[in-house]
Image: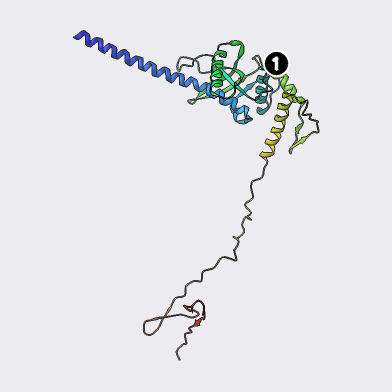
Amino acid sequence: MKKSRIALGALVLVGIVLLIIAIAYVSLLGENNKIDELTQAFFQEIREGNYLEAASGVQVKAPGPAEEPSDSLFLLELSLLKHYDLLGSDAYEVVTRKSHLWIPFIEDNPVEVAVSLRKTAGSGSFREALSVVGRLLSSRKDADFVGHLLTVRRRNGAWVVESANISDSVIGRTYDDMREELGLRQHVTETRHGFVVHEFPVSLDSLSPLERRLLLHVFQKAQTQLEGTRPAPSTGKIPGAAPAINPNESKETPPVSPIRNKNGGDRPGFGTRTQSKNPLNAKTAVAVRTPPV
């Protein structure tokens, strides 16, 4: 009887330990999945042209002279599209792979993320399933990834992108070539008080996907600068001016206090007008008080 109780207690204890391990493992996986979500959000901001939001707190380590954040992240996306032969396609997805499983108090805080681009399969449940399977298979191939492209770090309980490591990656040479291409197409030159748009021909028939993306980026920068100097909407009011008076508004006549007569009754005071009850015969009677002699 005593042995059975000991065995039962041991089984309960093992069950509790296994439950704690399972909960910790699920929580650990959820925390590591936040790294993938952060990477996806980072590239989504770049894809939508929100370069300032994406570049906040990110150090871009790229070959050549330092570029503006908008140019650096644009060239990063352009280099990845060129590397994976996706310049002519806008339908692509980002596949990520972490360097290791992050474990608190054991693993080092920074985690490096490898990135790969692949063309989306399209819409539909079957195609989405194929996309998921292809993503899982591609995550096992080292040749398909740009290794150690991003470094993420946990700060104040949240994951942030710390740096984009382009110089030492396989797209470093491509990035440098794209930077030179962008420099040759500076059709909009910034000045002290604005910018100058240079005259240049655009042939839509012979425009390559690379030239199209470069031109769109140049014009988007000019549009962003124009929107940043947009004046505030006018309220139509002059500061310090008195409010306008509407002549159609009716003014209320202040009430006149009645004057008491000798019998204690009330009678109208000076200038008080009594309107006739018949609106068709609107004659006005004026009662005037005569001072005693």
Display colour scheme: rainbow
**Quarter of the rendering containing residue 192:** top right
The percent position of residue 56, horizontal first and vertical second, equals 59, 28
Residue 55 can be seen in this image: no
* Name of the residue lying farthest toward the bottom: 293
Q: Residue at x 55, y 21 (%)?
A: 128
| Helix, strand or loop for disc 1 | helix
The percent position of residue 78, horizontal first and vertical second, equals 67, 22
Q: Please, what is the three-letter code of the amino acid marked with disc 1?
A: Arg
Q: Residue at x 72, y 23 (%)?
A: 210
* Name of the residue lying farthest toward the left: 1
- Picture layout, residue 142 above or below residue 31: above
**Quarter of the rendering containing residue 77:** top right
**Quarter of the rendering containing residue 176:** top right
Tag 1 residue = 173
Q: Please tell me which residue lies in front, 194 or 76.
A: 76
Q: Residue at x 56, y 65 (%)?
A: 249
- Picture layout, residue 245 above or below residue 169: below
Q: Residue at x 42, y 17 (%)?
A: 25
Q: Please tell me which residue lies in front, 251 or 183.
A: 251
